[in-house]
Amino acid sequence: MVRDDYYRVLGVPRDATPEQIKKAFRKLARQHHPDVSKAPDAAARMKAVNEAYSVLSDPEQRATYDAGGPGRATAPPPGADAQRRRRFEDSAFDAFFSDLFERHAAGAAPNAADLHATIELDLADAWRGGTRQIAIDLPGVDARGRMGVQRRTVDVKIPAGVKPGQRIRLAGLGGAADGDLYLEVQIRPHPRFALRGSTLLAELPVAPWEAALGAVVPVRLPDGQALKVRVPAGAQPGATLRVRGKGLPGKPPGDLELTVRVILPSAHDPRAHALYEQMRDALPDFDARAQDAAARG
């Protein structure tokens, strides 16, 4: 039986290095894989690419193929079909899913069977923790030995106070029986709060008299809990108030860091307009620019 020249299929020279062959395969797998290509011949092209790579990536089979010459059939060694399928599973996963999963856990010994993906959480979910059911696309091989995507629904236990960048391990959901799936946590933007590690950051809107005279004002945390925060008399816009232990839950918990933002009553309100005029007339020597310069040193 006459076959395509495997080097031509992958688009590499006959003296290509293993790295060049792997790089060419990864590129073609992303281009022709039936799950991403809409071309009617995508499956056939991917089959040819897979066959070429399974031979040329194996030193022994490559040597046998080279000895037979391009376009000539060679008898595969015993067990070659199973070996080829296993290599295809590994390499096709590496090529097709490399944009979604990473093979190495940062700071841990790599396991080629582990998968890495991301999970997006609302700040309230990260704050409270709990169990959440998610649907995730995982690589798999069907009954005909073809790589594809299998959607699975899994229960994910989210620890309370999980931080961005932390990983949640799902045992046994990796690329093989001994592999695990690691979900790296990402926190969706929140309209009022941000995170810096376990420190919860937010602005604290206050009225001019609250900043000037001092006050106790309410702050609602991401989980809905109401907190009372004391604003010291004379608090300036941009001042930082820190509430110990009221940030992201944990051991130890983070802090809550509030930046004072003074909200002025609109001068379009006749009452406020009249009070602004009274202040102007009562404090003719007040110079905001000079006071700011003095505060900055």
Image (spheres, rainbow, N blue to C red):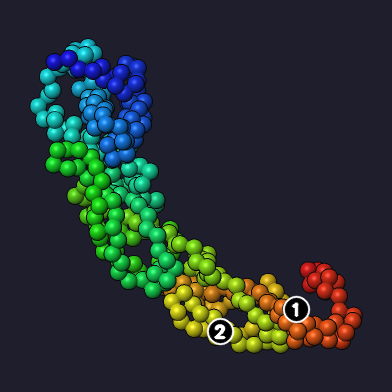
Total number of numbered labels? Answer: 2
Residue 80 location (% of width, % of height): 14, 28
Give the quarter of the figure containing the N terminus. top left
Identify which amino acid the numbered label 1 is placed on.
Ala
At x 23% / y 34%, what residue is drawn? 88
Q: Residue at x 14, y 30 (%)?
A: 81
- Residue at 24% over, 55% down: 152
The vertical placement of 134 against 248, above or below, is above
Going from N to C along the chain, the mark reached first, 2 or 1, is 2
Element assignment for label 1: loop
Q: Estimate how packed mark 2 is, as few (under 14), some (14 to 19) or many (20 or more) residues with alpha carbons within 10 Å.
A: few
- Labels 2, 1: front one: 1
Q: Is residue 212 left or right of residue 89?
A: right
Label 1 sits on residue = 267
Q: Is any part of residue 155 visible from this angle?
A: yes
Amino acid beneath label 2 = Pro
Residue receiving disc 2? 218
As drawn, is 272 to the left or to the right of 284?
left
How far from the left and from the top, in percent, is residue 104?
A: 35, 47
Identity of the residue furthest to the right in this view: 285
Single out the residue that lies furthest toward the left.
78
Q: Residue 83 is drawn in which quadrant?
A: top left
Give the percent coordinates (x, y) of residue 168.
33, 60
